[in-house]
Every structure is written in C-alpha cells, then in structure tokens.
Image (cartoon, helix red, strand yellow):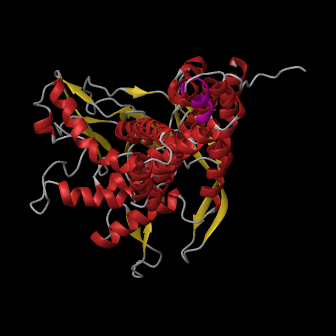
Amino acid sequence: MWSYLLKRFLLMIPTGIGVITVFFLVSEFVPGGPLDQVETMIIDQANQAGVGDLATLGAGGGSGVIAIDPRMRMQIKRQLGLNHDPLARYLRMLLWYGPDSMISSREVDDGFARKLSFQGRSLWVYRQQDTYHVYENECRSAGTSSQLRFDSETAMLVSTADEALRFEPETGRQAGGGSLALVRLPVKVRSESFWETEYLASGERRRVRETRDEVYLAEGRWAALASGRNWHGMFLFKFPVSITKNKASLELIRERLPISMRLGIASFFITYISCILLGISKAVRNGTVFDSVTSVLVLVGYGIPGFVLAVFLIQAFGPSGDSWISLIPLRGIHSPPEIYNTLGAWGKFWDNVHHMIAPVTCLTIQSFAGLTMLTKNSVLEQFHQLYAVAARARGLSRRKVLFKHVLRNSLIPLVTGFPARFVMMFFAGSLLIEKIFSLDGLGLLSFTALVERDYPLIISNLFIFTFIGLACRLLSDIGYVIVDPRISFESRKG
C-alpha cells in the first residue's frame, strides 16, 4: 500500500507539469495574453481620464491614438514576469533558479534616475552611459530619515525633508563637501538578448531580437543559490501577481480558501452522512409509506436548483421587511467586524454557524437526491447477492447482515464519486451560492478571473484545484481499501 501511495504522489508531479504546459501554450499563442490585458486596462483608463504618465500619444501626435510608452511597457512586462524568452518563462512557471534583474537599459535614459521597488526595497537607479549607480531610497541626517527625489535640472538626488541635502548620483556623496552619503548597493550589468514584440505605428506587431543591458544585484554564488528569492516556480508555491487585483495570487487564494473550506467541507460531510443514513433507511423500509414519502421529498429536492433555493430562502427568511420571518442573515460568513469582535468564543461559533446554515443547505440540496437514491439502490442490490442470502440462511438477523456484510460493499459506488464532488463543492457547486450570499470564496474568485481573463490568477487557481482533485482521488483509493479490505493495489505474483 505504501509503495502505491508513493507512486501516486510522484505521479502528481507530471500531472501538474502537464497542466502548466497546456496553460502556458494557450496563454502564449491565443490573442489577448496578460500583457495585452494590462495594456487594455491602462488605455481604457487613459481614455476616460485623458492622457497621463502611463500612456502617450501615438505616432503623429495629433492622431489622438493612445499608446503605451515603451518604458512603461517594459515595466509591465517585468512585473508580469514576461521580460524573458518563452523557454525561460516556461521553466520559471515550473521550477527554476535565476536571479531577477532590477532594471534594464530600456527603462532609464542616460543621465537620468528612476525610483523602483526591488525585492521589497525602495531604490534609486542612476544611469551614466553604461554604468548604473543604485542607492537605497533613504537619507539619514541628525537621527532622522527621509526619502529622496531626483532633480532633473541639477541631476541631483535631493532629500524630500530638506532641500539643502543634495547628493551626487555618481558617487552618492553629499554635494558641497558634506559628510553624509547614501547607502550604495553593489550591482553587475549583463548584456542579454531577448525575443521581443515590436509595436509599429500602424498598430501591427512583429517579433524582433533585441539586445539590452540588465542590471542585477551583485552577490556571491553560494549566497545567491541559498537565497529563496532567486528560485521560482509554482512547485515552490511562488505564484504570479494577479493582473486585476495587483496582489500575489497565492495571497488571494489564502484569503478566500477558509471560506470555501467551511462551505465545501461542511456541505460535503453533511451530504454524505445524511444520504447514507437516509438511503439505508429507505432500503430497509423499501416499499413502505416511509419510502414513498421520502422518495417524493427527495425528488422535489432534486428538481430545485441550489441557487433557486438560495433566492427563496433570502426572500422568505431574510432580514428584509417583506420576508415571512427573519431567520437567516443576508450576506457574509459572519457579522460585521464591529459586532463580531465583541462576541465571546461561543458567540463567534454560533454566529459563524448561523451565517452558514443557508448556503450549506443550498449546497447540500444539489447532490442530496442522487446520492440518496444511489445508496438505497446499492444496499438493495447487495441484499440480493449470494453472500447476503447465505448469511441470512445461517440465521443472522437482517440488521447484522446489513451492518456487517452489506454496508461496506454498498459504499463503494459512493467512494467512486468522492473526488469530483469534493472539488465541485469548492468551485462549480459554490459559485452561484457565493454570489447570492456575498461570500468571497474560491468559486467566485476563479469565475471572476476567467471573466476578466486574469491569466496569472487563472493558472494559480487551476494549479491549486488540480492538486486538490489529485489528493481527493488518492483519498478515494484509500477509501476503497478501508471499505473493502479485499481490494489491494499491491502487485501480486500468481
């Protein structure tokens, strides 16, 4: 069994690689990729507010066509991780070692400085021909600290707190012979060649080979290898930054995962436990009034979509004045913070349960009917098998036959659908429910990413859901062994 589990864990790796490969090919060759999405957002904002710093007039000036400034385009590509060749981008999505450059020769002109954020640090980069001087964006004087700005007229770095404090960008020393100095960072410059997309004045695009200088932070070889900042890839849980949210995808998923886990796990276990109990009861009382009445109720529940039931519950039992009685809250996973934070431990627990009753009920009703009838039919089928008939012939009671022999075999069909139903509770099954009850979970997050074509967030969600599904499939296989000990995944020699 352990060797089988190890094989399944190892097989998850090529599956994840396959998912990333397919998505990478789609995002590379289908029009409207991540860069196009960001450019469209910037141009739309510029059209609404007028031409600003992020966009410039296209060729001809008076044509009124808004285009992305080349320097800004390079900054966008760097933020999205698109400032590499396709092979390097693909490997960086999987698992790859490679230091990130902080700036290139295309992003800062000779004789000018630019402020940037690199690895969580605020820096100033001054270019002097092919030499780049990098300083921390901090000026310390008389126990106080202030940031810097670049004065293009005098070509000086100036303190924002005291205009008299000026620093030479070539040396970082205080102008006029002062004793102060800026903190300088050691860098190295490499000339690299990349395949880039050139944007013509006609609006056409063509692939060109471009050579530019890339500025890297100078560090020792072993220090660079040991630094986690230089390792990339989703297998290290280093996910890209969302285009529309401007936030790390992993952080967005981490924020919304607890909500989806509460809804998904609660509805999943409630569905399976209630369906097994009701299915067994219907099988034992097959043909009775109880069986007929519960069958009608099950079929009615089967015919009511979960989102329709959600709307009905809000209208009938919501907090509005038109409802019959106010029993369920309108939105959220708990009360507003100003109320929730004043509650005790028991009060917070009940508040969460109170807010979950309606959405969990709606999620449960979607798969309740099918699983109940499947359980009943499976139990009835096993009751007519020869082993069950023989057990009854030996004098065992119907209850002992049911719980000792029939029940385990009856659960095998339920275990088969375990992975798909569990993943569905997180995404497809909870999408409309999250929307109606204003629950910001993974289902709504994934749907929003698809609608907005937020490629980094899409691949991050896809990667997470893939491994959730694979883990559930593995749990399903383990469930087979628990339910029926005769099942073994070990190879046997005849």
Is the residue 37 above or below the residue 171 in the image? below
Q: Main secondary structure of the magenta part?
A: helix
Q: Residue at x 50, y 41 (%)?
A: 422
Report the side of 115 relative to 163 (left or right).
Answer: right
Q: Looking at the image, can residue 110 be seen? A: no
Exactly how many numbered labels are in the figure? 0
User: Does the magenta portion include 405?
Assistant: yes
Report the side of 432 relative to 32 (left or right).
Answer: left
Asked which quadrant contains residue 425, the reply is top left
* Quadrant (top left, top right, bottom left, bottom right) of the N terminus: top right
How far from the left and from the top, in percent, is residue 416?
A: 61, 39
Asked which quadrant contains residue 63, the reply is bottom left
Is the residue 206 above or below the residue 78 in the image? below
How far from the left and from the top, in percent, is residue 104?
A: 52, 46
Q: Looking at the image, can residue 34 be seen? A: yes
Report the side of 364 relative to 129 (left or right).
Answer: left
How far from the left and from the top, in percent, is residue 288?
A: 45, 47
Residue closer to the observer: 136 or 260: 260
Report the side of 345 relative to 115 (left or right).
Answer: left
Q: Residue at x 57, y 37 (%)?
A: 467
Residue at the far bottom in the pictured view: 63
Residue closer to the observer: 230 or 351: 351
How far from the left and from the top, in percent, is residue 420?
A: 56, 44
Q: Residue at x 14, y 60 (%)?
A: 323
* Quadrant (top left, top right, bottom left, bottom right) of the C terminus: top right
User: Does the magenta portion include 280?
Assistant: no
Residue closer to the observer: 44 or 167: 44
Q: Which residues are magenta?
A: 403-410
